[in-house]
Amino acid sequence: MAPPDFIIVGQIGAAFGVKGWLHVKSFAQPAENLLRYKPWYVRGKKIEVNEIKPHGDAFIVSLVGVNDREAAQEWKGREISVSRSILPKAEDGEFYWHDLIGLEVISPHGSVLGRVDSLMETGSNDVLVVKAGNDSNRELLIPFIKDAIGKIDLESGVLIADWPVDDL
């Protein structure tokens, strides 16, 4: 587990070839930003990258000390983290996903809809996954678009969403 000021920016996938290379999926936008974020941490430990190359819509990477396919397989599924401090400051009206997670979501009329649990990409727009009320099994999927999302106040931990609350 990475220290609390670290954020997840990618995930290591399956081995690539027989020389210890690994697939890496970037969570950065654009994906190439992952190449600028250094150093990388896996499970709270700093890792050294020998080389990284684009590969389709992801990357392949060679890590120091990972020299064969068997050693590479042990890394599969591990998350890549970086220090929050190396990320550029978000522009006005822009937000990092990790800053939205945990915000309380309320309607414009003050009804509590739940808390942002995660976000997902759908191709057309991002979607907030909101755990609704006290029932952690109920989710609201709210598109992250101008018509649905109002004010976002990171300091107070609140996001205003204009979303139906009839069934909560």
Image: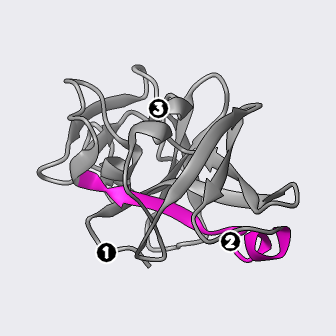
- The earlier-in-sequence mark between 3 and 2 is 2
Q: Which residue is mark 3?
A: 144
Task: State the SS at label 3.
Answer: loop
Q: Given this view, does label 3 or label 1 mark the residue nearer the observer?
A: 1
Total numbered circles: 3
- The earlier-in-sequence mark between 1 and 2 is 1
Q: Please say whether residue 167 is visible from this viewpoint.
A: no
In the foreground, 48 or 29: 48
> Could you say which disc has been placed on residue 3 in the image?
1
In the foreground, 63 or 117: 63
Residue lying at 44% horizontally and 79% vertically, measured from the top left:
1
- The residue segment tinted magenta is 69-84
Q: Please say whether residue 83 is visible from this viewpoint.
A: yes
Residue closest to the far left: 155
Left or right: residue 20 compared with residue 167: right
Disc 3 + disc 1, Cβ < 8 Å: no
Give the CA distance from mark 3 to mark 1.
29 Å
Amino acid bearing label 3: Phe
Q: Which residue is mark 2?
A: 75
Amino acid bearing label 2: Trp
In the foreground, 18 or 105: 18
Q: Is residue 10 above or below residue 46?
A: above
Q: Assess disc 3: are there few (<14), some (14-19) or many (≥20) residues with their C-alpha within 10 Å of its C-alpha.
A: some
Amino acid bearing label 1: Pro
Residue lying at 25% horizontally and 35% vertically, measured from the top left:
88
Task: State the SS at label 2.
Answer: loop
Q: Assess disc 1: are there few (<14), some (14-19) or many (≥20) residues with their C-alpha within 10 Å of its C-alpha.
A: few
Q: Quadrant of residue 121?
A: top right
Q: Quadrant of residue 133?
A: bottom left
